[in-house]
């Protein structure tokens, strides 16, 4: 069976060694680079399943590497986990807006890192399913063709904007979206939506979901995500 391939771009040798050891122990094939330009070329050559990308890199920084990867036809579908230092919320928001899948903050435990890696890889393997016309989760059914949302067999009324937000989040479980992300993907030509209105719509959706409201998680100072399945 082909091993899952991960490229690690990290300029701190001791952290790189820890990441490499733990990923290899889990059975992943690991390739690494110590700077952004080297890492970018390595990803283009290896075309891995996942990239662990430090944001603070010499030369070409992590944000620019992320931008270039998502702009390339051969690399845009590769999953990316950003590795950040504390106090870099603006870079986290920018990276997620460019298409990164998740982030982990230094210092992190190997256990936390492995959990995030497995979660992102699992979501990546389900990308084709994410385009499905029906999404079912924990008693919640979203039917695109019927434009209906049912909760435990009961229809719940949602506005067009609420439906679009819920469906988009549920189509990408576990992935964090900034308010700007949601605006760009759910706004229509006939609807004017300002940034803070996303929060209003999220509150309305949660109220309608009742005891299932925690399916939509708030990521402090970043945005929202649909809760990934546990395990």
Image (spheres, rainbow, N blue to C red):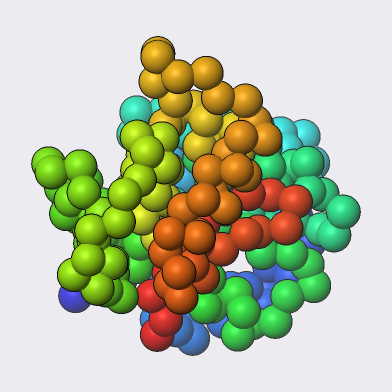
Q: Which residue lies at the image location 55% right of the left edge and 24% below the top edge?
A: 193
Image-based side of 65 in relation to 24, left or right: right
Q: Which residue lies at the image location 49% right of the left edge and 27% below the top edge?
A: 184
Whether 53 is drawn above or below 112: the answer is above
Q: Which residue lies at the image location 50% right of the left edge and 60% below the top edge?
A: 207
For this rendering, which residue is in front, 136 or 173?
Answer: 136
Displayed quadrant of residue 27: bottom left
Q: Which residue lies at the image location 68% right of the left edge and 74% below the top edge?
A: 17
- Residue 99 in view, yes or no: yes
- Quadrant where the image shows the C terminus: bottom left
Across and down, in percent, residue 99 comes to 50, 40
For this rendering, which residue is in front, 18 or 184?
Answer: 184
Across and down, in percent, residue 179 comes to 60, 38
Whether 171 is drawn above or below 26: the answer is above
Displayed quadrant of residue 135: bottom left
- Quadrant where the image shows the N terminus: bottom left
Image-based side of 217 in relation to 190, left or right: right
Across and down, in percent, residue 3 comes to 30, 71
Whether 55 is drawn above or below 125: the answer is above
Across and down, in percent, residue 168 comes to 37, 45
Which residue, as the protein is rendered here, is positioned at the far right?
87
Image-based side of 12 in relation to 123, left or right: right
Which residue, as the protein is rendered here, is positioned at the far left?
145
Image-based side of 81 in relation to 175, left or right: right
For this rendering, which residue is in front, 139 or 118?
Answer: 139
């Amino acid at each position: 069976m082909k091993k899952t391939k991960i490229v690690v771009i990290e300029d701190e040798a001791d952290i790189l060694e820890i990441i490499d050891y733990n990923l290899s122990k889990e059975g992943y094939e690991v390739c690494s680079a110590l700077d952004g330009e080297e890492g970018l070329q390595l990803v283009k050559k290896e075309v891995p399943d996942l990239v662990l990308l430090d944001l603070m890199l010499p030369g070409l920084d992590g944000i620019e590497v992320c931008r270039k990867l998502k702009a390339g036809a051969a690399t845009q579908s590769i999953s990316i986990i950003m590795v950040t230092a504390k106090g870099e919320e603006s870079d986290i928001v920018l990276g997620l807006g460019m298409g990164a899948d998740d982030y982990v903050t230094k210092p992190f435990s190997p256990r936390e890192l492995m959990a995030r890696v497995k979660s992102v890889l699992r979501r990546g393997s389900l990308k084709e399913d994410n385009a499905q016309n029906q999404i079912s989760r924990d008693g919640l059914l979203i039917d695109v063709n019927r434009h209906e949302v049912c909760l435990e067999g009961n229809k719940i009324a949602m506005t067009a904007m609420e439906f679009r937000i819920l469906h988009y989040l549920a189509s990408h479980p576990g992935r964090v979206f900034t308010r700007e992300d949601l605006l760009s993907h759910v706004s229509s030509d006939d609807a004017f939506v300002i940034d803070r209105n996303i929060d209003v719509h999220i509150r309305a959706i949660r109220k309608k979901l009742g005891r299932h409201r925690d399916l939509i998680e708030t990521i402090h100072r970043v945005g929202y995500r649909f809760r990934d399945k546990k395990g």
